[in-house]
Image (cartoon, rainbow, N blue to C red):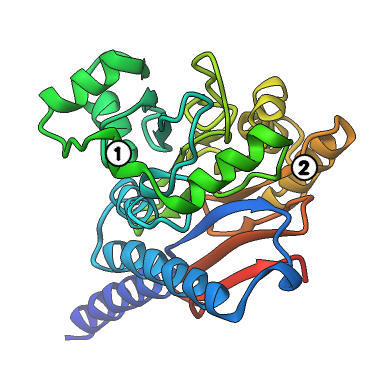
Amino acid sequence: MKQSFIIFSVLFYISCSNFSDEHFGLVIHGGAGTITRENMSAEKEAEYISKLSAALKTGYEILEKGGSSLDAVEATIRVMEDSPLFNAGKGAVFTGEGTNELDASIMDGETHQAGAVAGVKTVKNPITAARKVMEETQHVLLAGDGADVFANEQGLEIVPNSYFHTERRFKSLMKAKEKEIEKHGTVGCVALDKKGNLAAGTSTGGLTNKRWGRVGDSPIIGAGTYASNETCAVSGTGQGEYFIRGSVAYDIAAQMDYEKKSVQDAAQAVVDKLTDRGGTGGVIAMDGKGSFAMPFNTEGMYRGYYFSDSELTVKIYKD
């Protein structure tokens, strides 16, 4: 009887320990740029807070039920892609030719598998197309018409390019043709599931008035997106050319790996380096224990987090 009681006590302790140590959650961004209280109406601020909160709740519910970090990242980003508030999916900016070309990528921190699409014009949710590339092909990145054809073959929701046209973004194109304007709105998510696996994803419409098939950092693994259980998951937003040249997402992971920096120190060091080189933007990064960072060098960044041991939190401004 005494031996049975000891065995039961040990099993109960292990069970309780596992439960108390269970830590999961996600961090998101909706773009960085000149985002200040002065240029934001109360109504628009409320819209952003509502949509960012809805995205966080979507991903959190998946994680809470034991879903994978990959599932959470994809579903969370789809919420933002379906909103005209962000420069991704429905709210994508216009190219110089008056069309919309979208990019996205996703990466699994457990397997290091990744998928991406660039310059797609008819896929309603590019993040889902990116995941299909990862899971259904031997490739990492598909671009242009080939990516659209692939998405159609995979049974994804296909829409006419006019679906992405919004009056707000068209006006931005007109202004951009007159002079250079500030641009923001790329969306991203990093997540940690109950099994301790990390994942990251990023989706964007690119730059207003972009030309010649320009592709930014968002679909480039190691530049705008990266995930490894050994280090961290990262999604970036900002001037893509600088993120590509600096391998920003991987640089954070590398500093954690080689220099044994914390995720906070590594992320801040990389954003500082971005600043020194003349680039603007920000990142969200999270390690395998759920510690995270959201540094940026602009006046604001739409961002938020929701963890099993914290309240849902959304922030917009620098302060």
Q: Amino acid at mark 1?
A: Ser
* Nearer to us in this view, 12 or 24: 24
- Is residue 186 at least partly visible in the picture? no
Residue 276 location, x and y as percent?
89, 35
Q: Is residue 22 left or right of residue 4?
A: right
* Nearer to us in this view, 226 or 254: 226
Nearer the camera: disc 1 or disc 2: 1
What residue appears at the point 11 percent right and 23 percent down from the top-left corner?
A: 153
Q: Is residue 44 above or below residue 69?
A: below
Residue 50 location, x and y as percent?
44, 74
Residue 61 location, x and y as percent?
29, 68
Residue 189 location, x and y as percent?
47, 51
Q: Is residue 92 above or below residue 77?
A: above
The secondary element bearing badge 1 is classed as: helix
User: According to the image, label 1 marks what residue?
Assistant: 162
Image quadrant in which the C terminus is located:
bottom right
**Image quarter for residue 34?**
bottom right
* Structural distance between the alpha carbons of marks 1 and 2: 36 Å
User: According to the image, label 2 marks what residue?
Assistant: 271
